[in-house]
């Protein structure tokens, strides 16, 4: 009789497909009214002899039933977990959140382009100090304390000796001075911010950017400067761009020149951008003054060089056709997003 019940229980457990059904089988076998429990209740009517054998068999069946129910439960649980995991599967092919990478500011784009060009000619890219000493910003550049050239640039002082630099030219002196060996040739550019007490308008800002250039070696002439700037102009504004030198004055260069480029808008014919001259002024330059070479520790009888100072905003405005310098500082995304074409 118990063997038959055992087979029945085995069949039932085998047929079970889920935990709910298994619970049902448990109730039907070991529950209060379950088959095995019912049989246990019949024990009291059995003889002593029967109690022994039947009781033992019943106990074994109970144990066995517990074991197979347990095993089945474990199996079903595993299956359930597996099914749950499969149902929850993460779709790795869904597109992710858009990553908002920042863009280069037009001034950075132009700076990088200038750096690329001069690096390709073997120039190093140097950094100077934005808080500069009077000594480097003026005095060693041949602009003594009482020199009228200071008036145009006199600017933001921290104390009698320190100020926000008014141009990147102090980096000329610092670069030469930093070379322990004063026979080392110099070929460097230095991009960076400069400050002046200008009134802000469409073409002026109290803070703007320059790139200084300096080449010092034996036999460096204005012809080298012109050749270099011509290459530069062609790279920045196109192959047909021409360069024109006009005599000028800077205390730290002799001779000094203002450099114009053919207007890239009208190609030299004359338009509103170039005020009908066909030319656009782009930078100041010249042969480094012997006093500057000497102040920085080089021998001016052996070494000469050229230097130039270029306004980066100017280049950006010409290159991109920007009509007001203040657009470059307002951080208006509508404006800045137009320069998305990072090369
Ligand atoms: N420092 C000058 C300026 O800011 C530009 C310049 C640089 C001129 C180097 C000559 C040589 O106006």
Image: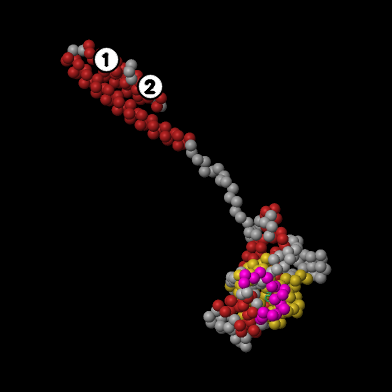
Q: Main secondary structure of the magenta part?
A: loop
Q: Position of residue 274 (x, y in %)?
A: 79, 68
Residue under the image location 72 percent in, 60 percent down: 326
Quarter of the figure with the N terminus: top left
Q: Nearer the viewer, mark 1 or mark 2?
A: 1
User: Pointers 1 and 2 in contact (CB under 8 A)?
Assistant: no
Q: Tag 2's secondary structure?
A: helix
- Whether residue 18 is visible to the viewer of this picture, yes or no, is yes
Q: Tag 1's secondary structure?
A: helix
Indicate whether residue 143 is drawn in magenta.
Answer: yes
Q: Looking at the image, which residue sits at the far left?
A: 49
Q: Position of residue 307 (x, y in %)?
A: 66, 77
Q: Looking at the image, which residue sits at the far bottom?
A: 301
- In the image, which disc is placed on residue 24? 2
Q: Position of residue 42 (x, y in %)?
A: 25, 13
Report how far apart the C-alphas of labels 1 and 2 lie in the structure. Answer: 21 Å
Residue topped by disc 1: 41
**In the image, is residue 147 above or below residue 205?**
below
* Lateral position of residue 281 relative to residue 217, left or right: right
Indicate whether residue 61 is drawn in magenta.
Answer: no
- Whether residue 226 is visible to the viewer of this picture, yes or no, is no
Q: Which residues are magenta?
A: 142-159
Near-viewer residue (17 or 247): 247
């Amino acid at each position: 009789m118990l063997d038959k019940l055992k087979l029945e229980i085995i069949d039932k457990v085998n047929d079970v497909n889920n935990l709910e059904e298994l619970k049902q089988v448990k109730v039907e076998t070991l529950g209060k009214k379950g088959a095995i429990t019912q049989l246990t209740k019949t024990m009291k009517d059995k003889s002593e002899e029967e109690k022994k054998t039947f009781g033992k068999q019943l106990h074994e069946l109970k144990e066995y039933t517990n074991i197979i129910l347990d095993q089945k439960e474990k199996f079903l649980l595993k299956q359930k977990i597996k099914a749950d995991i499969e149902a929850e599967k993460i779709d790795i092919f869904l597109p992710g959140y858009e990553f908002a990478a920042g863009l280069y500011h037009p001034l950075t784009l132009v700076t990088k382009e200038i750096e690329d060009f001069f690096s390709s000619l073997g120039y190093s890219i140097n950094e100077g100090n934005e808080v500069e000493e009077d000594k480097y910003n003026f005095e060693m550049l041949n602009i003594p304390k009482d020199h009228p050239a200071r008036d145009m640039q006199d600017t933001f002082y921290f104390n009698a000796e320190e100020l926000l630099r008014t141009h990147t030219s102090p980096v000329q002196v610092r670069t030469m001075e930093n070379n322990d060996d004063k026979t080392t040739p110099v070929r460097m550019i230095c991009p960076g911010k400069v400050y002046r007490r200008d009134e802000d308008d469409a073409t002026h800002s109290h803070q703007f950017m320059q790139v200084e250039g300096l080449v010092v070696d034996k036999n460096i002439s204005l012809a080298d400067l012109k050749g270099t700037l011509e290459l530069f102009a062609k790279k920045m504004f196109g192959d047909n761009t021409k360069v024109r030198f006009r005599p000028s004055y800077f205390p730290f260069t002799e001779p000094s020149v203002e450099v114009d480029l053919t207007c890239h808008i009208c190609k030299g014919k004359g338009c509103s951008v170039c005020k009908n001259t066909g030319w656009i002024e782009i930078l100041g330059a010249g042969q480094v003054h012997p006093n500057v070479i000497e102040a920085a520790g080089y021998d001016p009888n052996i070494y000469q060089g050229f230097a130039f100072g270029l306004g980066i905003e100017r280049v950006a405005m010409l290159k991109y056709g920007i009509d007001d310098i203040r657009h470059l500082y307002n951080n208006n995304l509508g404006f800045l997003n137009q320069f998305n074409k990072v090369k």
